[in-house]
Amino acid sequence: MDICLASAADQAAAVAGGDISATELLEATVARYERLNPAINAVVTTQLDVARQRAAAADAATAAGESWGPLHGVPMTIKEAWDWVGSPSTSGHEELVDWRPDRNSESIDRLLDAGAVIYGKTNLPVSMADWQTFNPVYGTTSNPWNTDLIPGGSSGGAAAALAAGLTALELGSDIGASIRNPAHYCGVFGHKPTYGLVPIAGHGNPGAPTVLDIGVGGPMARYASDLTLGLDVVAGAGGLDARGWKLDLPAPRNDRPDTLRVAVMLESDVCVEQDDELTVQLAATVAALGDLGVALDYNARPAIDLEKSHHNYMMLLRSATGSEYPADAYEAQKEHAARWAAGDRDYRALAGSGITMSHWQWAQHHRQREDDRLAWDAFFDDYDLLLCPTAASAAYPHDHTGERADRTIPINGGQQPTTDQLFWAGLSCGVYLPGTVAPAGLTASGVPCGLQIVAGHLRDRESIAFAAFMERELGGFQVPPGYG
C-alpha cells in the first residue's frame, strides 16, 4: 500500500522504525499533493520550506534516539481557519488574504508538540458557513469520489484531502456538522468532540481569543484509531483553564458488542425528507451490526421534544454565529427578526431572530438546553449509543447559485431546502454531545455515506470505539477510484 494511504499511527511507526525518514515521507506526500490536488483543490495553501526544515529536524532527532511524540515525522494538513504562523487564516474572505497570525492556535501547537509536520491548509466556505466548500480566495473544492459533487463543509477540504491521501490526519471544526457531514460525504472518519474538549481559540476571526458557543475543534482521519490518536493530542483544558483543569476521559463502559445497548433513529419528522438510497444503505449497515450481536432498539428516544429541541439549537446556533457580525450586519438582521415575530417561518427570519434576541431570551434557550442535556444524560444511562444519519442525503452536485438560504438539494427526484437538514447536525451539537461519523459503505449510486454515532457527555471514547468496531467488522474507508 502507498505509504500516503497508511494511518497516521503507521506512518509514525515507520519513521520511528527507520523504514522511511520524515523527509522521505514528506516528499512522498508532497508529490502526491502535486499530482492529485489540482483535480479537487483540497489543499489550498502550503509552507513547504517550513515543512521540509521541520522534517529534517525530525530526522535529526530520530538519529539521536529522540521522539517528539506520537506524530513524530507525520506530514499533515489543517483546516484553513486554524492559526498557523506564516500562513493566512482568511476563512474565505478576500480582505484577509494578506493577514498572518503572530502565533499558532493552541491546538496547532499541540499537534506540533506531538511531532506533526504540517505542510498546508485545506479549503473551507466563506465564514465556514456552508455545507459546500467554495470561496473567492481559493475557489471550489470537489469530492474525490466524483468531482461533480461537493465534499461537504465547512471542513470540506479536510475530508477531500483525507480521501485523496494528501494527509493522514486533519484538524477540522464543527458547529453545524462541519466535521461530520464532510466525513459522511467523502467516506472518512470524523469526530465532533464534547463541547469544550479541544481548545478552539485562534480559530476563525483573526486573532480572536473568544470561544463560540457550540463550536468545537476535532480530528478527522481515514482510520478510527487515528481519531483517538488525534483527540489524545489536542484534547485538554486550554488557555486560562489549563492552569488548573486536567482532562480524564472515561474508557468505554462496554467493550463487547453483545453487551452494547444501542438506540437507532434513521429518520425523523423534524428533518427534511430523507433520500431513499441513503436510508436503505444506513438501514443495511445497522442491520449488519445487529447480526453481529449488537442489541438494537429502534424506538428508544430521550425524554425531550425533539422538534422543540431542534428549534432551540437553531436559535442558539444563529446567536453564536451572529455574535461575530459587525454592527451594520447585526442591525440588518433586525428586519428578518421582525418578520419572525410577525409569524414568518422562513430560514432568514429564524436566523434574524436568533442573531438579535435579547440576553434574557438567550438565557431561556440556554435553560432549555440544560434541561435537554440532563434528559440526554439519563437516556445514556440506559443506552450506550444512538445511531442516526449525518445528513439527509449523500453528496450532491455543486450549486453556487444565490445564497445558501435559497438553495435546495436533490432528494428522491425533488428538491428540498438545504437548511432543513440541520436536524441531524444539531441532534448532538445543540446539547454539547460527542458525535463520531464512520463510513457505512456506498449508496446504490456508488458514493460514500457515513453513520453518525452519538454518545453521552464526555463519553467520546465510546463513540470512537464503536466506529473502530464498525471498521473492523464491516469495513471502513475505501480508496476512491483513481486514488489508489
Image (cartoon, helix red, strand yellow):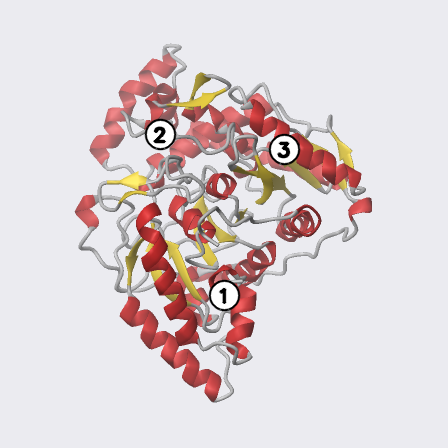
- The numbered disc on residue 3 is 1
Amino acid at circle 1: Ile
**Crowd tier of the residue under label 2, counting other residues whose Cα lies within 10 Å: few below 14, some 14–19, many 20 or above:** many
* First of labels 2, 3 by sequence position: 3
Which residue is label 3 attached to?
Answer: 282
Classify residue 90 as left or right of residue 159. Answer: left
**Crowd tier of the residue under label 3, counting other residues whose Cα lies within 10 Å: few below 14, some 14–19, many 20 or above:** many
Residue 52 rendering spot, x and y as whole percentages: 33, 73
Q: Would you say residue 351 is visible in this rendering?
A: yes
- The numbered disc on residue 355 is 2
Q: Residue at x 31, y 19 (%)?
A: 336
Classify residue 94 as left or right of residue 340. Answer: left
Amino acid at circle 3: Leu
Q: Residue at x 73, y 34 (%)?
A: 287
Amino acid at circle 2: Ile
Q: Eyeballing the image, is 470 above or below 244?
A: above
Check the picture and name the quadrant holding the N terminus: bottom right
